[in-house]
Image (cartoon, grey):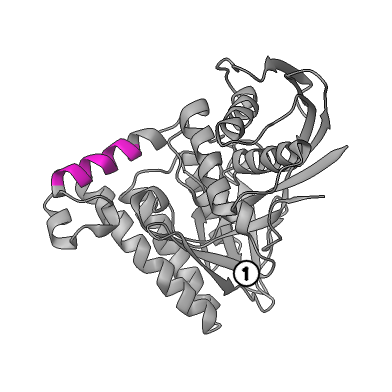
Amino acid sequence: MIRAFGPGRVNLIGEHTDYNGGLALPFAIDRGVTVEAEPLHEPVIRAEALDLGERDEFPLADPPAADGWRAFVRGVAAELRAAGIDVPGARLAFRGDVPRGSGLSSSAALETALCLALIAAAGADEPDRTDLAKLCSRVENHWVGAETGLLDQLASLHGREHHALRIDFVTLALDPVPLDLAGWHLVTVESGAEHTHAGSGYNERRAECRAVCEALGIEHVSQADAEAAAGLPEPLDRRARHVLTENGRVDATVAALRGGDLEEVGRLLEASHASLRDDYEASVPAVERTVAALNDAGAAGARMVGGGFGGSVLGLLPPDARVPADAVAVAPGPPARVL
């Protein structure tokens, strides 16, 4: 029996920048999805989502399209085979402790765990992990219907204990940044509004960002000149402004962490949330209530995490703050791995 674990992730700062050629600062967490794989002698995948009590079966040769978790399993098997990995028939079973729709990337956790389990079942060498992240992104884009970038998959596959990862999404350069909280608390609180990439305004924002690039004749929004972007029609001007200012906040956060200035990190989280709410319009009332509750509890800063339109809120609380009862502490953990 093969077991593999894929972690979820928290993005400290740098939201909606990955698919815009920008910067982000995520880290893998210790919660995620565990997949068990048992090779079969017939060319089929039999999969069971243990948390849901649901099953699926499909032929390896030509997996048909599907919805929900089945799209992830079928897409991973098909993309691995397309990449030259001789995935065998297998019985798969998985469960997770990352809440679905929480904005902590249960999808990337599932994808990376499935990939590592099926690669091990094939007896193949593990590919370059950045290439594997791109494969997982193709699963989301082509099989699930969500136009995600690479942030979640890179964080899950390249996570490092006690560090966040500064990612440049043009070069895909990964720079570990020590995340020493010195007695402070990073927590997430679920807003109660479930987030899904494929069913939210996420794809609409992707389309607006493509429109920014077409209007300015650039490849990535992060390449935009701020003055030229300000002259775009509504709401494209605000979408571009969010991306440009958010890139600046990522590097400011890296500098604050290296300098041990957690108060400044909190201020940057607040500014990030304001930009996501006002310029990117990715918030919903449940998220705003959760941000307000964390601030009332004494957070130095709080902001939505993930693609927005629901999901969780991240809060940074000083040592003497009252941690809300429904908050879950998060810290950088190791990457996806075969157990």
Q: Relative to the observer, which residue lies in front, 161 or 238?
A: 161
What's the residue type where badge 1 is placed?
Answer: His
Horizontally, residue 197 falls left or right of residue 69, namely: left
- At x 13%, y 61%, the residue is 227
Horizontally, residue 251 falls left or right of residue 60, namely: left
Say above or below: 86 vs 149.
above
Question: Which residue is identified by label 1?
Answer: 163
* Residue 209 appears in the rendering: yes
Horizontally, residue 101 falls left or right of residue 253, namely: right
Q: Position of residue 280 (x, y in %)?
A: 33, 47
- At x 59%, y 16%, the residue is 62
Q: Position of residue 84 (x, y in %)?
A: 59, 36
Residues shaded magenta: 205-215
Circle 1 Cα neighbour tier, 10 Å, few/some/many (<14 / 14–19 / ≥20): many
Say above or below: 25 vs 85.
below
* Residue 234 appears in the rendering: no
Judged by its main secondary structure, the magenta piece is helix
| Image-quadrant location for residue 86 | top right
Say above or below: 93 vs 286.
above
Dot 1 lies on which element? Answer: strand
Horizontally, residue 306 falls left or right of residue 201, namely: right
